[in-house]
Amino acid sequence: MDAADSLWRIFEAGKLIEQRKALGPPYMEFLRVPSLSCGIYFLEAGARDLQAPHDEDEVYFVLSGRARVHVAGKVEDVQPGSILYVGATAEHSFFEIEEDITLLVFFASGGPAE
């Protein structure tokens, strides 16, 4: 990666989804910089989401699929276009995954935006 790549990059969601699928694991990180990490997370219909709480704040954007999510004692339905914020260390998991679900995931670290 040259100096310009460290300042900006363009990613195509469709290509990232295909790369993740080819690799196999449910999560594929595609960007990591000091204050941000981004990835694609995929769960098949009927799958169990086994993730544990994270040390960073996290935002999920549902690209496709439908499921329910349990966060800190609350349950909500998510579908394409849903945006979900989960604070650092909050217990959370997707369940009742009725359609294969693909999520764009952002992990934030550092201070507030300026």
Image: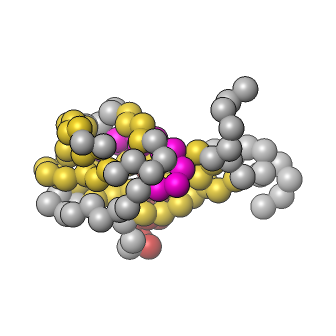
Does 18 appear above or below 98? below
Residue range of the region highlighted in magenta in the rendering: 54-64
Judge whether residue 113 can be spotted in this image. Answer: yes
Q: At which x and y percent is residue 53?
A: 41, 56
Q: At which x and y percent is residue 40?
A: 44, 55
Q: At which x and y percent is residue 36?
A: 63, 48
Which residue is at a point 34% across and 51% down the rendered structure image?
91
Between residue 77 and residue 25, name the one nearer to us. Answer: 77
Between residue 80 and residue 114, name the one nearer to us. Answer: 114
Per the picture, the main secondary structure of the magenta-coloured stretch is: strand
Which residue is at a point 42% across and 37% down the rendered structure image?
85
Q: In the drawing, does residue 46 fall left or right of residue 26?
A: left
Question: Quarter-wise, where is residue 45 in the image?
Answer: bottom left
Q: In the rendered view, how is the structure colored?
A: secondary structure
Does 114 appear above or below 103? above
Q: Is residue 61 magenta?
A: yes
Which residue is at a point 70% across and 53% down the rendered structure image?
33
Q: Does the magenta stretch include residue 63?
A: yes
Q: Residue furthest right?
A: 3
Q: In the drawing, does residue 45 fall left or right of residue 89?
A: left
Which residue is at a point 78% across and 45% down the rendered structure image?
7
Q: At which x and y percent is residue 108?
A: 58, 45
Q: In the drawing, does residue 1 fall left or right of residue 56?
A: right
Judge whether residue 106 can be spotted in this image. Answer: no
Q: Quadrant of the N terminus?
A: bottom right
Does 48 appear above or below 72? below
Between residue 55 and residue 25, name the one nearer to us. Answer: 55
Q: In the drawing, does residue 110 fall left or right of residue 55?
A: right
Between residue 71 and residue 44, name the one nearer to us. Answer: 71
Q: Quadrant of the C terminus?
A: top right
